[in-house]
Amino acid sequence: MAIVSREVREGLQTQGEDEQIAYSITTTPWGSDPSSVAVVVKDESAAFADVTDTVTSGSASANGDIITTPIIKSLAAGRTYRVEVKFASGANVFECYFRIRAER
């Protein structure tokens, strides 16, 4: 299966600075039954600094072909974040991503 882009189909998301959201990703473009899920959040506005510990709460989970991210919170309005989701499917390891633009 050829993957044209690692960016999830939904693309850029917007999230209010006071909102707390857990996002869901369908892994079928890459593989089925994801395991070993890891999520990293990087602040694109700060040279892709890793801000995972500051802007996430909880941990990622997988159910069937759906990965749910930890809750993403405490984003700074005007900044753009890249959420990278790494997971195993069979013998393969994939990493997809989506971006969030934080708003007031």
Image: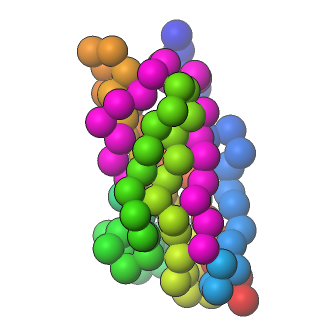
Q: Can you tell which quarter of the image residue 50 is in?
A: bottom left
Q: Is residue 29 magenta?
A: yes
Kindly identify the residue that appears in the image at 27 percent across and 15 percent down. Answer: 91
Residue 90 relative to residue 79: left or right: left
On the image, the x and y values in percent for residue 65 come to 54, 27
On the image, the x and y values in percent for residue 47 come to 37, 74
Q: Can you tell which quarter of the image residue 46 is in?
A: bottom left
The residue at the far top in this view is 1
Q: Main secondary structure of the magenta part?
A: loop
* 89 over 12 or under it: above or below: above
Kindly identify the residue that appears in the image at 40 percent across and 64 percent down. Answer: 58
Q: Nearer the viewer, residue 9 or 70?
A: 70
Q: Is residue 73 magenta?
A: no
Kindly identify the residue that appears in the image at 44 percent across and 75 percent down. Answer: 55
Res 6 seen here = no
Q: Quadrant of the C terminus?
A: bottom right
On the image, the x and y values in percent for residue 27 come to 54, 29
Total count of labels: 0
Q: Which residues are magenta?
A: 20-39
Kindly identify the residue that appears in the image at 30 percent across and 36 percent down. Answer: 36
* 91 over 18 or under it: above or below: above
Q: Can you tell which quarter of the image residue 54 is in?
A: bottom left
Residue 78 relative to residue 86: left or right: right
* 83 over 38 or under it: above or below: below
Q: How are the residues colored?
A: rainbow
Res 103 seen here = yes
